[in-house]
Amino acid sequence: MSEIILVVLKILPVLLLIGLGIWLRKHSFVKLEAIQGIKKIVMDIALPALLFVTFLQTELKSEVFLLSIVIFVASSIAFGVGFVFRRVQKTANPFYPSLFATFLTGPFGFPLFIAYFGSENFYRLAILDVGNSLFLFTVMTVFLSTVSCDMRSVQKQSISTHLKNITKAPLAVSTFLGILFSILGFGTPLC
């Protein structure tokens, strides 16, 4: 029973912040523009910085890359299962398969993980997220660029366009730069 109390006490601050956010939104305490600005700061600056530093400070071994490949394959299989379920359930929602292969680890999972396991163990979850992030920035972005609520508005994008988009995504860039700098041995002098 004491472990349950420990879990609740560690995760309670995160849940209270989520509740505060819901209350603030419900009572229009903060304007939508401010929320979008805060979200942009978190998703484009704070979270990428956290990922960069985490990977920079992590000693990356070959097992890490194998694990990333396994997660990428598992995400691909889950994505395929989404197409099967879409057919079985006879849903016309073109986005349905994407629900099976996206795990939204960053904005929600990272804070909960850090609250419970501590920031010193964050690299463990971040490493697991590399395979799914690679899946999201490759397969999922290509898929999502081909579907729309209004099928007439979909324009095919070239592979070079997708690659340019990956190089502009702060989460992808920070993750891969952190891994690269760690592999090259820059982590120790910089940290």
Image: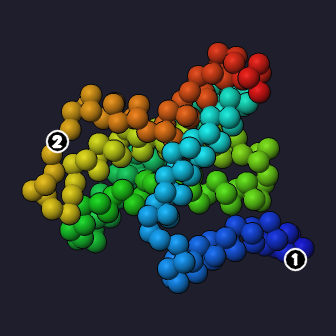
Residue extending furthest toward the bottom = 27
Residue mark closest to the camera, 1 vs 2 = 2
Q: Position of residue 9 (x, y in %)?
A: 82, 71
Q: Residue at x 76, y 19 (%)?
A: 189
Say which quarter of the image contains residue 6. bottom right
What mark, if any, has residue 156 been given in the picture? 2
* Residue 84 seen: no
Other residues around mark 1 within 10 Å, as few (<14) / some (14–19) / many (≥20): few
Q: Residue at x 61, y 57 (%)?
A: 109
Other residues around mark 2 within 10 Å, as few (<14) / some (14–19) / many (≥20): few
Q: Is residue 3 above or below residue 135?
A: below
What mark, if any, has residue 33 been given in the picture? none
Query: Which quadrant, please, contains the C terminus?
Result: top right
Q: Residue at x 68, y 60 (%)?
A: 112
Find disc 1 in the rendering and name its residue.
Answer: 1
Residue 152 vs residue 77, the one in the foreground = 152
Is 169 on the left or on the right of 10, as rendered? left
Q: Is residue 168 above or below residue 19?
A: above
In contact (CB < 8 Å): disc 1 and disc 2: no
Residue extending furthest toward the top = 184
Q: Position of residue 45 (x, y in %)?
A: 56, 44
Query: Which quadrant, please, contains the N terminus?
Result: bottom right
The kind of secondary structure element at disc 2 is: loop
Is 89 on the left or on the right of 123, as rendered? left
Residue extending furthest toward the right = 2
Residue 21 vs residue 63, the one in the foreground = 21
Say which quarter of the image contains residue 48. top right
Q: Position of residue 11 (x, y in %)?
A: 74, 67
How far apart are the alpha carbons under marks 1 and 2?
55 Å
